[in-house]
Image (spheres, grey):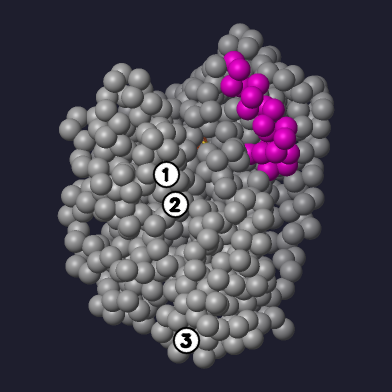
Amino acid sequence: MITAGIDIGVEHIKVIILKDRQIAGRAKGSSGGADRGGMVEQAYQAALRDAGATRADVVKIAATGKGKHNAAIADVLISEQVAAAKAARFLYPGATCVVSAGADEIMAAVLGEKNRINEYTFNQKCAAGLGLFLESMARRLGMSLEDMSRLGAPKEAAVNEGCVVMAELDALSLLNHGVSREEVGGAVISAAAVRAASVIHDITKPAKDCVVLVGGLARNAAFVRALKAISGIEFLIPGEAEYAGALGAALPVAETA
Amino acid sequence: MKEGQVWETRPLEFWAKAKELRASWQASAGDEARVVGQGSTYSVDWAECFPALNVVEDNPGGSMIQAKDSPFARKCRLASEIRGWGREICGYTNNLWGSMFLGYEQDGRPFPLRQFVIPMGAECDQHTKRGQQCRDFSPVPQWMEDHCIYFGEDDPERDVPIIEHNDYCQLRQINDIERIFGQKFNDEKLSDMIKASEIIVEYARDIQVLIGTTKPAPLSAKDLYSVYTIGHLTKVDPQETVNFWKMVRDEVEWRAKNHIAALGTERFRWIEAHPPSWHFLKYYRYMEKYGAVCVGSQYLQQNCELLEYKPDGGIDRRAAPKYPADTPIKTREDAIRVMVGPDARTPRAWKSDEYIRRDSIVEFAKIMQADGALLPLWRSGVGCTLTRKEQAMRLRNELGLSVIYYEGSQPGDRTDLDELRFLDHLDTWMESLGFEKLED
Ligand code: SF4
């Protein structure tokens, strides 16, 4: 049986095709601007090609992510937290907590029995868009995301940890005062990690022993290093980190289809 | 029958009477022959004892502006902002006084300039500053309605001067208003109102207890919100108000006995702590799609005062010093003393006292048999947000309740409330607990 999960984030669309609960194909595309429906379609077609499947083969499609309401082709909508939780348990059956750090939102969920979520926390609005912020800061600093990913901890520089708009102004101010772009980049990463850690710390009954980190920021080594240093957590990062939402959306429909 | 429906539901019969009372209050509020003052919510209960005095209460005023007319509310807040009242100021405040700065009300009628103002000193500095915009605008007299607070366990010794001061504030306000505006205060009416208010509190408590102890809940918090101002914030005839609350209590009692549900699909009960975003009440109905009913809010609790479990397992008002019901009222001072009461911390303690507020939600959640709580994080106005995170921790740690937040500016300011994000989070909340929508 073939099912599909589509994760429509604010930056990227990720699609996973599952065949008998195994990943058979995947694709990633830009979330697009006005034509998000068209971009969803393109990414979906690409994933089908990757899986060697056709539309007619797919029994059910589930969508998740901030843009899930734009997925006209979806049969079911699944919330991002639930999708991340399903994926974490699928990839690591012993997972006790999942942290998802994407372009727009950071959330942490404590996983309970029967794949239920015991508790979850998410960032407050002023700290939304962390992933987007890192991308835009990379552009401002004239770096690629890969360059950013290689940055170390800042020596002295710091930027606002509460609000990304203020953080950007702080970063510009540092640059104006001659601070190196590597140092500023490190400060930016470190502020992002503090925000993410605060979401994890917000959990009243933490389960820190088997924590899975997913989402686009899980691929940013500097961010992961900083987050680990602040939170003291050794994260499990799956190869599918970026596709976790799509995978988690496809899984429950595979169970019920 | 709807999908998932287990219990019968019926329209509320007290609704028509509630509308009638509200309309008659609104009509009286527009009487131009009256002196118009500005008072704080839950105080100046004595205003109706003056023959021609209208004391407009600030909270419903500011929240009504937002609830009824968002573009006008925006205009009001801008009018406040350009006079130096920043965006971090409570939305109720900026809406209401913004309307004064603009010079007109929502319906275009001239703003009735206040001839005096009585702000309330509370834990929220912005409640306290409510008089300033008005006083700066025109030099009117100001009195303070003080609500001193302190932390820690009850301290009867400390309560004495607090109560003395509260009594004095009220007495002085009445005496001064008599003198300045040349109106005769009706002391007899005050004692009638005090008695009526005691009876209303009893009815309100019965209602809250019935909702908490009955599954399915016979009335939802959303329904209760529609009437809770009657007799408290809206000053109508005391006897008529008593009759109305009796009518509500009797109907709720009947519904409870006959398993008539507020929500026929009830399978998840949640509580909240503070006023909702008045312009966006849609979330109650949205939750109902999941069979989730809001059974109470600490804010609504003020009608019945704090509840607590008694040693016999029953539920009653929180034990607090109280004058006996037959305390003689011979003088104005006697009346004021009975009205203020011998307890410095109730009934508003849940709101103005951080210590009690934090603890009382746990008791409240238990009494209401809540499965979860939805708490607001308001960005402007400390009083509306204070202790929310602590409350969440207590609810999670002590009761294992599922708690989520939503963010906004303040109940009367829609600026920061992302309505779609809010609804998305409700979906997530319900899905994470394993619920699916019963209808869409
Ligand atoms: S923020 Fe809340 S508590 Fe403070 S003044 Fe406004 S309504 Fe009152």
* Mark number displayed over residue B342: none
The picture places residue A84, in percent across and down from the top left corner, at: 40, 68
In the rendered view, tell whether residue B85 sits above or below residue A18. above
Residue denoted by label 1: A135
Disc 1: CA contacts within 10 A as few (<14), some (14-19) or many (>=20) = some
Q: CA distance from mark 3 to mark 1?
A: 34 Å
The picture places residue B258, in percent across and down from the top left corner, at: 63, 80
Residue denoted by label 3: A19
Q: CA distance from mark 2 to mark 3?
A: 28 Å
| Amino acid type of the residue that numbered disc 2 sits on in the rendered structure | Ala
In the rendered view, tell whether residue B291 sits above or below residue A229. below
Q: Nearer the viewer, residue B306 or B221?
A: B221
| Amino acid type of the residue that numbered disc 1 sits on in the rendered structure | Glu
What secondary structure is found at the residue carrying circle 2?
loop
The picture places residue B264, in percent across and down from the top left corner, at: 64, 77
Judge if badges 2 and 1 mark residues of a common chain.
yes
Q: Which of the two discs, 2 and 3, labels the residue nearer the N terminus? A: 3
Mark 3 chain: A
Does residue A105 appear in the picture of this structure? yes
Q: CA distance from mark 2 to mark 1?
A: 9 Å
Residue projecting furthest to the top? B139
Disc 3: CA contacts within 10 A as few (<14), some (14-19) or many (>=20) = some
Mark 2 chain: A
* Mark number displayed over residue A103: 2
Dominant SS in magenta: helix
